[in-house]
Image (tube, grey):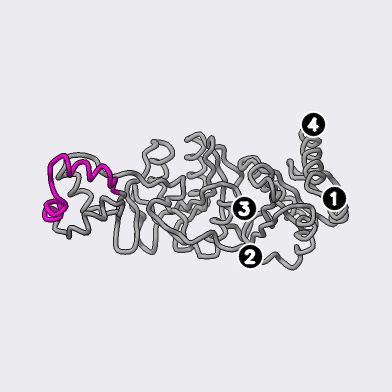
């Protein structure tokens, strides 16, 4: 299957599941292909035939964007090396959850989350430690008795009850012993933190030298600016005191056909992520592109604070809607 067809299939699946899906980020480089929202769930999705193409730099940027946009970064792919991804298994690459299309279908359409996740050494599941302890005590089994049944140490059983996850084989044996479900699903949309401990959000990259002046102006206006390297926008900016309420996707370049294309994609992403978007240009012949406000560099420098920029963005977006 071609990558373009795979992107189309994933997009159609998410729409069938009730997601609003952005336009495809058909530009390079790109950290994610589409943004999609269903209610409070917002995902940024990278779609690949071979997930080995997902590198560390892209993973770090997607994790940063997930933090700034309150979104879950996610990779949907077909295979790793020469092996197809297993259904109903969550994999991880550079701290980002990875699903096969079948697993994504079960999660989003059937609303059946995966139970298994891959980690060094094999496949594992979440054990409900409290439930396991209750089942063991109901049978009047000691830790040692259960350990003998499983062929593990007493200390290992104690760790299972304290929340340590188990191999698929051990989990199946436990459920057979007690004839009860003892596993819990992987919470993919919460970042799967319960099964995958990641490092802190990677630091922001340095801004492109060509964008440093724009970053400085936005900073003086009261915005905290997070540069990006692999997104349709150059930065995610938010007011320092209102991080969750006023997020702006910002771009900057000469106003060319390529810039117009980026501005349209930014608008589509902004619609899904519930953010605003502004594109800074040297000269503008129009006020906006599909809701992305165009602001000339000199005009930006004259804006005194975030409130003025917010007003300009709103007025130009509304003007285009009314046209």
Query: Residue at label 3?
Result: 26
At 72% across and 52% down in the image, what residue appears?
250
Mark positioned earlier in the residue sequence (2 or 3) = 3
Query: Residue at label 1?
Result: 304
Q: Which residues fall within the magenta stretch?
A: 127-150
**Mark in front: 4 vs 3:** 4
Q: Is residue 143 left or right of residue 307?
A: left
Query: Residue at label 2?
Result: 205
Query: Residue at label 4?
Result: 322
Q: Is label 3 in contact with label 1 (beta carbons under 8 Å)?
A: no
Q: Is residue 42 left or right of residue 176?
A: right
Circle 2: element type: loop
Mark positioned earlier in the residue sequence (4 or 1) = 1
Mark 2 → mark 1, Cα distance in angstroms: 26 Å
Circle 1: element type: loop
Mark 4 → mark 1, Cα distance in angstroms: 27 Å
Residue 314: image location, x then y, percent? 77, 39
Magenta stretch, main secondary structure, is helix
**Mark in front: 2 vs 4:** 2
Placement of 263 over or under 39, stated as above or below = below
**Mark in front: 2 vs 3:** 2
């Amino acid at each position: 299957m071609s990558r373009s067809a795979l992107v189309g299939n994933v997009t159609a699946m998410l729409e069938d599941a009730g997601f609003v899906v952005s336009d495809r980020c058909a530009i390079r480089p790109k950290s994610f292909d589409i943004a999609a929202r269903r209610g409070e769930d917002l995902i940024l999705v990278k779609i690949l035939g071979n997930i080995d193409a997902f590198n560390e730099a892209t993973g770090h940027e997607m994790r940063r964007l997930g933090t700034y946009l309150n979104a879950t970064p996610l990779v949907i792919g077909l295979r790793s090396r020469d092996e197809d991804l297993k259904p109903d298994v969550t994999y991880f690459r550079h701290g980002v959850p990875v699903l096969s299309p079948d697993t994504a279908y079960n999660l989003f359409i059937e609303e059946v989350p995966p139970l298994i996740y891959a980690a060094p050494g094999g496949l594992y599941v979440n054990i409900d430690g409290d439930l396991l302890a209750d089942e063991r005590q109901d049978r009047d089994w000691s830790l040692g008795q259960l350990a003998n049944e499983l062929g593990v140490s007493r200390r290992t059983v104690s760790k299972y009850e304290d929340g340590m996850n188990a191999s698929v084989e051990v989990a199946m044996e436990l459920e057979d012993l007690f004839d009860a479900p003892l596993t819990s699903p992987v919470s993919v949309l919460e970042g799967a933190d319960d099964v995958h401990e990641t490092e802190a959000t990677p630091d922001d990259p340095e801004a492109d030298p060509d964008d440093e002046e724009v970053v400085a102006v936005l900073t003086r206006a009261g915005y905290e600016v997070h540069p990006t390297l692999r997104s349709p926008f150059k930065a995610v900016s938010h007011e320092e005191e209102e991080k969750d309420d006023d997020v702006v996707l910002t771009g900057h370049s000469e106003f060319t056909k390529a810039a117009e294309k980026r501005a349209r994609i930014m608008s589509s992403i902004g619609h899904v992520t519930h953010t605003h978007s502004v594109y800074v240009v040297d000269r503008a012949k129009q006020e906006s592109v599909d809701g992305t406000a165009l602001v000339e560099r000199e005009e930006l420098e004259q804006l005194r604070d975030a409130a003025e920029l917010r007003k300009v963005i709103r007025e130009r977006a509304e003007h285009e809607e009314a046209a």
